[in-house]
Image (cartoon, rainbow, N blue to C red):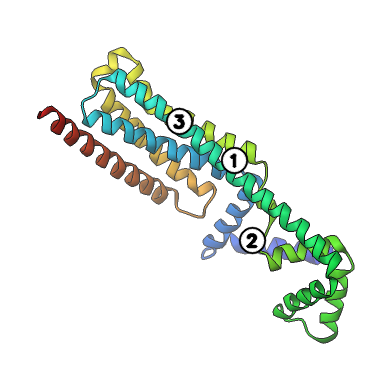
Amino acid sequence: MPEEKIKKLLEHKAKLLKQPGFEGYSRLEEVFHKRETGQYLSDIILGANDGIITTFVVVAGASGASLAPLVILVVGFANVLGDAVSMGFGNYLGQKSEADYNRSQRRKEYWEVEKFPEIERWEIEEVFKKWGFKGDDLERAVEIVTSDKDVWVEVMMREELGIIEESVSQPFKRGLATFLAFVLVGSVPLIPFLIPPLASSAAIISSFVAAGELFIIGALRKLVYPVNWLKAGLEMLLVGALAGGIAYTVGYFVDKFVNSF
């Protein structure tokens, strides 16, 4: 198809997506391109989300048990750093394992193409048959793909194994992004406990700070997923409030139980 015609069609598509009734499709396309260019964004949001909820739960539970501000600080920071390391390394190892698995499967596909080309060619035919190719078109498509070993293996990776290697990249950086987001965001609710004049109301201030963070982080999900920012923010706030409420209740009753002896 001529490039000029493609250009016009793309312009028409862009205009159509801006019209009323197509907002959902427009949002999906926008999010897709953002995910393509911001591969670490989901890791940052995941780390920040877990960091704030984890810290909020610790502060709420410790406050319910009437623990001293210093104790809350020690437990809070220890928990933030410990969980951040766990989350960061967990993400890194998960991404690395998936990348190693994908590379192993690619080596295996090259080996199969070299040792069993008839079987692999038949598998390519089956793939194209599912796509609707028949007769001469089928033979021509198979011939084109199997004439280039790299293309052949790539098709097998995607269609037979369902592996898209571009979705897994830079495991160390992605693990580091999760770790840093967890520490930076998760530490914020602990700041009021570091300021002596705020010691008496540090728990209340910390709760409001955590609530604000929860809403903002939830709303930021719109950068990765096609969701309404207000709804996403309120959902995250509700989850955090529920977790914090449970932690506070447990801390309160455990404290009463222990002090009853």
Q: In front here: 138 or 16?
A: 138
Q: Please state which amino acid type lies under the numbered disc 1.
A: Tyr
Taking the image as shown, residue 13 lies to the left or right of residue 231, namely: right
- Give the mark nearest the N terminus, 2 or 3: 2
Give the image quarter of residue 77: top left
Q: Name the outermost residue toward the bottom.
A: 135
Q: Please state which amino acid type lies under the numbered disc 3.
A: Gly
Q: Position of residue 121 (x, y in %)?
A: 82, 74
Which residue is label 1 attached to?
92
Q: Position of residue 257 (x, y in %)?
A: 14, 33
Which residue is label 3 attached to?
82
Which residue is label 2 attached to?
15
Give the image quarter of residue 175: top right
Image disc number at residue 130 = none
Taking the image as shown, residue 102 lies to the left or right of residue 237, namely: right
- Give the mark nearest the N terminus, 2 or 1: 2
Numbered label tally: 3
Vertical side of 118 occupied by 219: above or below: above
Taking the image as shown, residue 190 lies to the left or right of residue 142, namely: left
Q: Position of residue 179 (x, y in %)?
A: 53, 33
Vertical side of 224 occupied by 80: above or below: above
Real-space Cα separation, disc 2 to disc 1, in angstroms:
41 Å
